[in-house]
Image (tube, coloured by chain):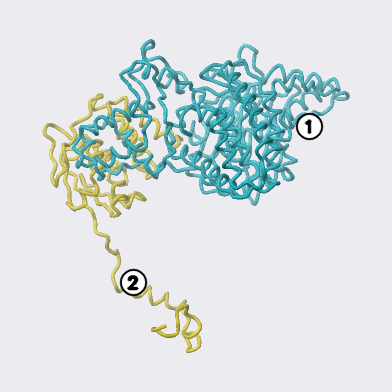
Chain colours: A cyan, B yellow
Amino acid sequence: MVMSLSRLGSFHQSKLSFLRSFIREFKNWNYNRNLFDLDKKGYGTAVYSFEKKGRSYSLLCFAQHIKPEERSDRVIATKWDAAFVLHDGVPTKKDIDRLRRNVPQQEVGRLSYKELTLSRANKSVRAFDHVVDSLSSGKQPDKELLKKVGYLYRTTAVYGSGKFGLADRFRIKDRKEIYGPFRLEMMLVYLVRQFTFDQVNHIAKSRSPNKAVTLNENIARNLGIGNSTGLGMAPFLVNHPTLLHNWIYCREKALKQIRSIERVKIEDFNAFKNYIDKSKLSIDTWLTDSEYQISKINSLKSDLIKFIKYLESCYSTESDYLWNHIYLWSEKNLGEECVEYIVSMMMEPYDSIIDPLINNMSSEEEKYFNIPGYRKISELKDIIEKNYKPIIQIDFKNKNNTSNFWFISKNKEEPRVANRYEEHGSELEQPLAIARDIKQLHERLIRAKQTDTVAEFLLNNNDLRHVVRRAFIIEKFPYSEIQDNTIGASLIPIDMLRLKLSFFGAVKFDPRSDKWLRINMYQGAPLPNEMKFSNDNWVYNSLN
Amino acid sequence: MQSFSEIDTTSKRASKAAGFTWGVAEEIGKNMRNLEMFGLPGIKNLNLYFRKIKKKPNEKPKRIEKKNKPKFKEFCPIYCGVAFLDNCKKLENLKLIKFFNVSYPLLLLPFLSRSSDIVGKKILVKYEKNNFLLNFDKSIFSNNSNNKIVSKAKEISIEFLENNNSFSLKDWKELYKLSEETFVEETDSLKKKGAGAGLTDND
């Protein structure tokens, strides 16, 4: 079942991913480095922009010195090597001064409606120092070392949509170039990547003006931007049900269309095999210490061997509905990690199927917020029985099924999860135990008078109002709910993170615990001066 | 300046802390966003109401009728609003509804504004010399330009307005006549060739 957490937590980047659609959309915009005012050690201000037909987006970068003991990827950090903000338009000197005071403070600073996204990042000291040392002594850095890390900086949060005073989405949602979800977050990360290259080149040149060399573009291209992601991301999926639906719906729609192709063209099939071959490289260099992930990678590797053998034995372009056969065979014979991998690869040859879906992946949750109070209890009961089948089977009297609770931490206002029976605070639980509350709603609906209206029911049952709303949403948006228990003892929160990050286009998921992980974004992506001539296959051309 | 998203999230959390359920708190978050967007002092009224109730919301109506009086002291504007919103399609038939003794009545307004959108009719709200015309949740016209805080409305009247023109037939004819100047006089030839339908009515 596609909406189970283990399946969602096996998703991979694909042609639908947002960082790939960002590059497709912005490849013809004019890129500029408008300001680069760093001192010899690389501290100072830089501004980068994309501009087209009078509209521009500018990334402001503020790099500063921090002590090694101040460097932390955890959300509790208060200082970072660099802080970034994406400004709407061309910033004035006054804007730059204002942002210099606020952006390095991140959550404690204040932004305005003229700013769109906010982020911060720390150096991967090992990789960064090695690259600067190498370049300043006239050598290119050791590719093997960079292969292990994959980036020079790691972001630890990217904020948007009204946080800390940033522009609300409604102010900009009608701009065609940002119809796809998270496009401005993707832009910020992309430009940050370029800043990291410019910064190492600048420091090396400042250190040894006569001897330093510039970072080789092939090496730079193979570096991405790291990201450390914690639980902050998980409730997002629960709090944006129609958005989640649109992402999964587009994926399902693409898959359905591909499986319905009667005669697969030989060139499309060869492209599929080619992408599988190339991407195997990235699986071999997918490093993690997480036993959970190691076991998933191993199952992916062994399943891929099985799959390739199957392909060699079964394929004929003469077969009707070849993709459908491949998909059904995969579902029957392979694990979820590999099935999802193959689904991603199957999308690759089909621009004509994927491209029209991209702009349907955003959503306006507000449109579906109102509860139709005039509907009957019997109708609501039917909706739940049809759309929450696995959920209403769960026994919530069993403590194992309610062992966790989600809360917002007081110091960082970020979501956290804890054991209900061992920690304090469960009385302040967030409304994220959807499965438990849906089950409770179902039980009450069974006892209620079936001809009553939902409005009548709510007069005495407003404690379940939040899930009544969700039930009417799922009626219209069948992929809007994770069909699993998000408070059970067996919950693996990083499955929720991986779902979101795979849609971002992240690769090399590296769980550091069951609650946070590291990833890499834009590894292999064209550099800004190459965007115009790039194709969408970059993700496979350069992965290592 | 706070973004509307911050207003929504913080109002929702504060409402939960003030004694409302999460589902109702979600409604309040959206409402505060709307009030502030329309330039009305939502946050100020909400703070004052929460201060007054000390985590025990005022009375909720058991059901909504033409005239609604609290059993004890004052109605909670939020519970009145939630019940009104949930029942708005049915309440439309009552045409004019009155509530008596409602705390901070401005907090009821966004529920009525959303109801106006759902039933597709403008709603006129009157209390304590304040008039508000709610236009399908797209805008609110008000004579309360100084945003004076009303801590209790002795009587609130809520009227569903029939969808009537705001202009006379004479006004319309005058405008229509001018619009006709964009039309082309039809010759016999244009009559034959210009239209898409068949040349006889019996083909």
Residue B161 appears in the figure: yes
Count neighbours of disc 1 (C-alpha within 10 A) and say few if under 14, some if 14 to 19, many if 20 or more: few
Q: What element carries label 1?
A: helix
Per the image, the residue denoted by label 1 is A218
Q: In this view, does A459 lie to the left or right of A75?
A: left
Instruction: Between residue A260 and residue B198, name the one nearer to us.
Output: A260
Q: What element carries label 2?
A: helix
Instruction: Between residue A261 and residue A351, name the one nearer to us.
Output: A261
Count neighbours of disc 2 (C-alpha within 10 A) and say few if under 14, some if 14 to 19, many if 20 or more: few
Residue type for callout 2: Trp
Residue type for callout 1: Asn
Looking at the image, residue A437 lies above or below residue B193: above
What percent of the width, then of the height, locates residue A447? Answer: 20, 32
The residue depicted at 29 percent of the width and 39 percent of the height is A380
Per the image, the residue denoted by label 2 is B172
* Pair 1/2: label in front: 1
Q: Residue A39 carries which label?
A: none
Disc 1 sits on a residue from what chain? A
Disc 2 sits on a residue from what chain? B
Tell me, yes or no, whether the two marked residues, 1 and 2, touch with CB atoms within 8 Å. Answer: no
Q: Could you say which quadrant of the image residue A41 lies in?
A: top right
**Between marks 1 and 2, how big is the CA–CA gap?**
70 Å
What percent of the width, then of the height, locates residue A230? Answer: 52, 22
Q: Are marks 1 and 2 on the same chain?
A: no
Looking at the image, residue A398 lies above or below residue B24: above
What percent of the width, then of the height, locates residue A482? Answer: 43, 31
